[in-house]
Amino acid sequence: MSAEELVSTPVPEPTLAPNSQVFVVLHKDPLRERIDVRATRVLQLEEDVLFLAQTNPPLTREHWGLSMEVAVLTPESAEALRPVGYVARLLSVRDDYPLLDQTVEALALSAPNPGDFFETSLRMHYRVPVAEGMGVVIRLEGLDEPELLNFSAGGARVRVPAWEPGLAGLELGQAIPFRLLFLGSGYAVGDGVVRSMEQSADGASVVFGLFFTNMEIRDIRYLERMVARTVSACRQRERDADYV
């Protein structure tokens, strides 16, 4: 695809329906490879104001007036999602937003206009898909043998059976101690903050995204080296396969 075609490729306009999952991208720091993404959900789109559920950690009056991205995952293919977002301004934080028969804390942000959405990213790191025999596994406190789907230097996606007892009470924003093991080499430890949770279509499993934090410098450096080494090995296998 040429640069001209890439620029002209239309970005889908997602439907910001009540209860749909969205992400507030509060801060991106490419130099330090840090990104502050907070998962939430749509409460209501009312003309030029988008109301979202309060995030965890919460946004406060100190954030009023700040610009931030609101991102939504949209289907790219039958098996993949891509994030698109728009730049919004936090108008206010309400502690009395009416929802059914109760009031909840809500974020009031400027709503998007037609053509405002653009392709964005919810992570700063290359994510490595885990293949059988790769020798990379994850251990999570309170969960029995979680299945590691992919990982990066900044986080991971994990799948566990829906009947897993440890899922009871697991919430967005909760931190889970983790150990990421590279069998025969070593491991990295820290806390994984739950940033997203999604149940499979058949209800048999739950996939959740983790953001790695509370890691010692040596663990961070080790994980970065192992990710780079794994990426290099995967790309070499792909190059070799071209000649088979």
Image (cartoon, rainbow, N blue to C red):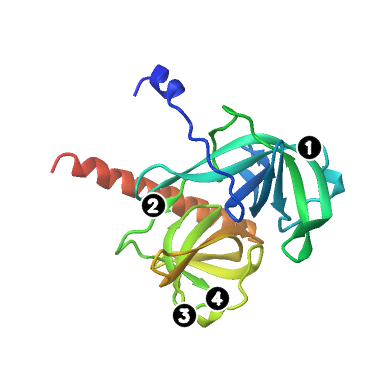
User: Which residue in the structure is indicated by mark 4?
Assistant: 167
Residue at image position (45%, 54%) is: 226
Disc 1 from disc 2: Cα separation: 39 Å
Is residue 158 at all visible to an observer of this figure?
A: yes
User: Which residue in the structure is indicated by mark 1?
Assistant: 66
Whether residue 132 sits left or right of residue 108 in the image: it is: left
Disc 3 from disc 4: Cα separation: 8 Å
- State the SS at label 1: loop
Residue at image position (82%, 37%) is: 65
Q: Of 33 and 72, which appears nearest the observer?
A: 72
Question: In the rendered image, which quarter is residue 69 located in?
Answer: top right
User: Which residue in the structure is indicated by mark 2?
Assistant: 230
Mark 3: amino acid: Trp
Mark 2: amino acid: Thr
Mark 4 vs mark 1: which is more N-terminal? 1
Mark 1: amino acid: Leu
User: Which residue in the structure is indicated by mark 3?
Assistant: 163
Mark 4: amino acid: Leu
Disc 2 from disc 3: Cα separation: 32 Å
User: How would you rate the neighbour count of disc 2 (Cα within 10 Å): few for under 14, some for 14-19, many for 20 or more?
Assistant: some
Disc 4 from disc 1: Cα separation: 35 Å
Q: Position of residue 138 (x, y in %)?
A: 47, 68
Which marked residue is nearer to the observer: mark 2 or mark 3? 3
